Amino acid sequence: MGSNETASTLTLVGVILNLLAAFGFIAILAIALIPVLMWAPEAIGWVLLGIGIFLIPATIIGLIFGFIPLMWRHEPQQHKVGLIIIGVFSLFSIGGLFLIIAGAIAETEGA
């Protein structure tokens, strides 16, 4: 297995972990809203504001950082810098580390 196949596999694992983190944020948001809806529905706006300030943007960013490298996984050598940059920005999950490693070990075109 060459380093480009390894980089492609690491990219796929990183994408899966980033998407799991994004869907985890969605699940946390839904679970956090259940008690509010049951006992204090009039406070839903404040809860959405408080929880949503972090979770909603983190979910959107996680989905973006999951789907962009998914398109790059077949040719990681052409997207080395992009994989490293997205990996650095998504270090909140272990998937970011996999993307950094994939970008670092991908061979260049001339190699």
Image (tube, rainbow, N blue to C red):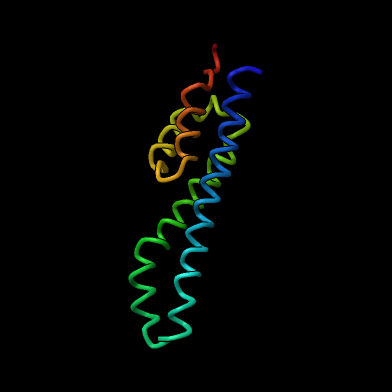
Residue at 49% across / 69% down in the picture? 31
Residue found at the very far right of the displayed protein: 1
The residue shown at (50%, 33%) is: 98
What residue appears at the point 34 percent right and 65 percent down from the top-left corner? 53
Q: Residue 47 location in percent, x, y? A: 37, 75
Q: Is residue 8 above or below residue 44?
A: above
User: Left or right: 106 with respect to 39?
Assistant: right
Taking 69 as reference, is 100 above or below it? above
Residue 69 locus on image (x, y percent): 54, 39
Q: Position of residue 33 (x, y in %)?
A: 46, 74
Left-right relation of 80 to 11: left
Give the quadrant of the C terminus: top right
Vertical order, 54 against 72 (above or below): below
Task: Name which quarter of the figure residue 89 lies in.
Answer: top left
The residue nearer to you, when weighing 42 against 70, is 42
Camera-side residue of 61 and 1? 1
Please give the name of the residue rendered at 55% of the width and 17% of the height, measured from the top-left corner. 109
Between residues 48 and 79, which one lies in front from this camera angle?
Answer: 48
